[in-house]
Structure formats: C-alpha cells, structure tokens
C-alpha cells in the first residue's frame, strides 16, 4: 500500500468515526428529548387539572384487595423503561410481597379503568385508557427512616417494560444545571390528589426551615427534606413530583425531578408541603433503574 492510498484510507476511517460519534450524540440527545416533555404554553395555564397528556410520567399506586385492586392514595413517577419512583412510606407494608401492588400508568382520571380503550375530556380530546402493570420488586433506600420519615424513597421494578407513548413517558432525572439551594424558588408539581379524580398540578415556592416551622407549628422537615408553600391549598397524594426546568438558550426544554411530596401539613393554618429532596440520592436512583 503506497502512502497516498494509506492517507486516503485514513481519511475514510476518520469520516466514519465522525459519523459514528455524531450518531451516538444524536441518539443521546433524542433519548433526553423523550423525558420531561414540556409545553411552554401550559406553564402559564391557571387550570388546576392537567390536560390528558400533560405530565405523562405520573401514575397511581394500587394495592390488592381480595380479587381486585384499589387505589392506595400514592403517586408514582416513571423514571425508566421498567421503573417508577415513589415514597418508601407508600410501599413499606408490601416490601416482601410486591405482587400485592400494581401501578396504573397513562392515567388522567382515577375513575378510568385499564380496560377502557379511550378516555376523553370535556373538550373532546381523547387519549388511550390507562395501563395497569404489576410490580416485580421493591427497592427501598437503605437509609429510609421509618421514624423520622427521612430519605423516603422507593424504586418499583415493573414486571414488564413500559410501552412509551405520547401519554406515557419518563421524567428526566438529570438537570442540565441546578442551584446550590432550592430556597425561594418556584416549582411546578403534579399528580393526583384528594379533592379531584383528575390529575392535578400546581405551583409552590421552596421556603427555609425556619419559615416552615413557623407556618406548620411544631412540624418540621427531616434533615434531607425541604418545605414548599403552595399557591393553592389542595392536598396531593404522597409521591407527587416536584419539578425543575432545564433551560437551553433561554427556552424551557424539559422538566426534571427535584423531589417527591412526602407530607402535607394543613391543620389550623397555612398549607405546607414537605418534600423529599432527591439531589443527594440521584445517583442511587440512576444506578438502581438501569
């Protein structure tokens, strides 16, 4: 092989490497685009209920009761193709018997059943009915504290892979960047709640622990939790997702998970949310959802 031919082969090889690298980067970017779906126009909506396809990562936990399943009053968040995240307090009683619980995904109204092919809102917008998936295994964070309620996190591995659609998608775990402190920042949150069957949403500001203690009386969040003051006093189920936004070139591109609602204090005073911060445990979540 002469020198000219060798140089030509090297150029071809170099182009192939560039193409392969570009393809990999494109695939990674595409994967990121498939999580945390965000429509900027909906950020300014005053509706307390979501659109049917809004926050498609939110689901509901169900527990076996005789021959059927009933609503357990806890939210779950899709974080991978086979896993959802919820609070440890929601599943602790079923730790040794994961077959006793299931999750309902692609759900917009808690009254909708898995055998319904289509569900529609009052404007005639229809989406496929919810899908119920059995739970194969429960992984609670090894430091989850039953007494203090701290590190209230659990990962549920589902029996089958989640079939992703426009209405069933994961929430991003990794932020592009995030602040050192959440205090005085507003967060969007979503999930199901006690006063309405439809998937709801809201806005809340993270507040200091001192301010939290004054507002909530004697209650105070655990070491790895923070408080948020909601615009509305709606009492959401545990496991509701609190979300930050990934901003690229001054445009909000996607939501990422900041924390899970673990407690609502509302008796005799302002409503205060206690949020389990996931920032310190993000690596644990990612390692256990591969």
Image (cartoon, rainbow, N blue to C red):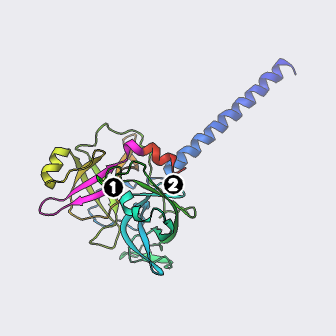
Is 42 located above or below residue 287 in the figure?
A: below
Q: Secondary structure at mark 2?
A: loop
* x 18%, y 54%: residue: 219
Residue 73 lies, in percent from the top left, at: 35, 69
Is 180 located above or below residue 221 in the figure?
A: above
In three-dimensional space, the C-alpha distance between marks 2 and 1, rounded to whole angstroms, equals 26 Å
Task: Judge the density around disc 1: few (<14), some (14-19), many (≥20) Cα neighbours within 10 Å.
Answer: few
Residue stretch rendered in magenta on the structure: 260-281
Is 242 located above or below residue 70 in the figure?
A: above
Residue reaching furthest top? 3
Label 1 belongs to which residue?
Answer: 146
Q: Left or right of 278: which side holds 24?
A: right
Q: Is residue 179 visible?
A: yes
Residue 269 lies, in percent from the top left, at: 12, 60
Label 2 belongs to which residue?
Answer: 80
Residue 237 lies, in percent from the top left, at: 32, 64
């Amino acid at each position: 092989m002469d020198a000219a031919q060798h140089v030509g082969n090297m150029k071809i090889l170099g182009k192939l490497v560039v193409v392969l690298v570009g393809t990999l980067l494109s695939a990674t970017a595409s994967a990121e685009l498939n999580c945390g779906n965000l429509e900027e126009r909906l950020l300014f909506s005053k509706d307390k209920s979501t659109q049917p396809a809004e926050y498609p990562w939110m689901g509901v936990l169900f527990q076996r009761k005789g021959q059927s399943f009933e609503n357990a009053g806890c939210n779950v968040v899709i974080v991978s193709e086979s896993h959802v995240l919820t609070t440890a307090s929601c599943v602790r009683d079923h730790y040794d018997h994961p077959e006793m619980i299931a999750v309902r995904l692609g759900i917009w109204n808690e009254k909708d059943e898995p055998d319904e092919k289509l569900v529609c809102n009052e404007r005639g917008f229809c989406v496929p009915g919810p899908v119920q998936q059995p739970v194969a295994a429960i992984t609670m964070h090894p430091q989850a504290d039953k007494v203090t309620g701290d590190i209230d996190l659990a990962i549920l591995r589902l029996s089958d892979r989640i079939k992703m659609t426009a209405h069933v998608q994961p929430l991003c775990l990794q932020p592009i960047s995030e602040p050192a402190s959440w205090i005085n920042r507003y967060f969007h949150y979503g999930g199901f709640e006690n006063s309405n069957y439809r998937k709801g949403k809201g806005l809340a500001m993270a507040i200091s622990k001192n301010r939290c203690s004054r507002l909530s009386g004697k209650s105070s969040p655990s070491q790895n939790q923070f408080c948020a003051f909601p615009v509305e006093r709606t009492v959401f189920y545990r496991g509701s997702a609190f979300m930050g936004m990934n901003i690229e070139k001054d445009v909000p591109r996607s939501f990422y998970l900041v924390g899970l609602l673990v407690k609502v204090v509302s008796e005799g005073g302002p409503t205060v949310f206690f949020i389990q911060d996931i920032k310190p445990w993000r690596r644990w979540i990612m390692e256990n959802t591969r």
